[in-house]
Image: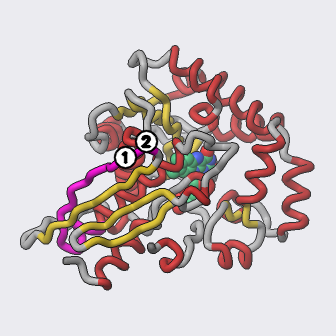
Amino acid sequence: MITDDTFLKIVRSAVKAPSSHNSQPWLFSREKDAICIVPDFSRTLTVADPQNRELFISLGCAAENTMIAARFYGYNSEMHIESVEESTKIRLRLRKEEDQVQPDLFSYINYRQTTRNMYDNFIIPQEYKMELKNTITLPNIDVIFYTGEDEIKKLYPYILESNNIQISDLSYIHELIQWMRFSQNEAVRKGDGLYVACFGFPLMGRTIGSFVVGKFMSAKREERRLLKQLSKTSTTALITSMQDDPTNWIHTGICFQRLALTATKLNLNHSYLNAPCQVPCVRLQMMSQMPFPGAFPQLLILLGHSEKMPFAFRRRINDVLI
Ligand SMILES: Cc1cc2nc3c(=O)[nH]c(=O)nc-3n(C[C@H](O)[C@H](O)[C@H](O)COP(=O)(O)O)c2cc1C
């Protein structure tokens, strides 16, 4: 039986997980000896993520944080993913363990962040890459590292084409603006969304902010920013899965969160370049060039060194409980 106090402590760690657009599309409930996580479809990104693929990856990240925190508080977890028709539920059955080993990733849950600064071309040592690769322990999930300018350049056509398609799509920009938080007041009040300070942008308020993004965000400008960012990054990692369904998306999130926390432990920062996995026609082109035939690209991330940025906010715990 999990006490109220332990349940709340575990959920507080769970919601520190990353989610696309910081939409936090999760709800938590407690059963006698289990914590359940279900999607909150009212937080779906209908344009950027119409299949809810990233929604389920985000749920997987939250599930991994839940299991790490549960272990910290003395519980082993056994995960079951229950899919009945349209509904998917992650049930984590917790069992008290007397002599638990303290999980070494727990302390990095609060410290991990998406760091969108420019990186410094740091070459990631081979042993770090091995440690990151060893975090991928679920069947069907894998990670491919692209290291150095020549290898990373192979990804340029996909990154640039998908960026062009997304930024030229008014409905994508409209949805993005809805999820942007242009002032600290708005970010704290809502507790979700993309706080502009996390991108290094000035605070400006919603009216001016929406106008500026709508008027000045262009595919060309974004392409220049991406090329600059890529020229300063020596390693990218592509997480793939062999199947493309809610269970595999959740598994992707679990493995990715372990990788992101391990990167944080190794003092590496990470950020996302996910457009090629989001735009269907580009994703298909990328699939045809994958080292493992048939693997689905799920997440493309940059790894390196840079200064930390302001942290993103989270909603109040009461808002994510059912
Ligand atoms: C599945 C998934 C996709 C994401 N895609 C992007 C992306 O394309 N670009 C980006 O800047 N951040 C992306 N993020 C990062 C989120 O925006 C970030 O997790 C959220 O704003 C909360 O910030 P934090 O990670 O620093 O806690 C993604 C996160 C997840 C889980």
The secondary structure type at the circle numbered 2 is helix
Please state the horizontal and vertical placement of residue 293, each as a whole percent of the image: 41, 16
Quadrant hosting residue 12: bottom left
Type of colouring: secondary structure
Query: Which quarter of the picture shows residue 282?
Result: top right
Nearer to the camera, 95 or 97: 95
Q: Where is residue 69 in the image (x, y as percent from the top left)?
A: 30, 68
In the figure, is residue 170 to the left or right of 94?
A: right
- Residue 68 position (above or below residue 83): below
For the point 84% across and 67% down, the residue is 206
Residue 293 lies, with reference to residue 173, above or below; the image says above
Seen at 33% across and 35% down, the residue is 126
| Above-or-below relation of 64 to 300 | below
**The C terminus appears in which quarter of the rendering?**
bottom left
Disc 1 is placed on an element classified as strand
Q: Residues within 10 Å of mark 2 (few under 14, many from 20)?
A: many
Q: How crowded is mark 1: few (under 14 residues within 10 Å), some or many (20 or more)?
A: few
Magenta segment includes 197: no
Q: Residue at x 7, y 73 (%)?
A: 98
Residue 210 seen anywhere in this rendered image of the structure: yes
Q: Residue at x 33, y 72 (%)?
A: 30
Closer to us: mark 1 or mark 2? 1
Residue denoted by label 2: 246
Q: Nearer the viewer, residue 183 or 45?
A: 45
> Which label was assigned to residue 135?
none
Q: Is residue 78 magenta?
A: yes
**Which span of residues is magenta-colored?**
69-85
Residue where numbered disc 1 is placed = 83
Camera-nearest residue between 6 and 163: 6
- On the image, the x and y values in percent for residue 315 come to 56, 73
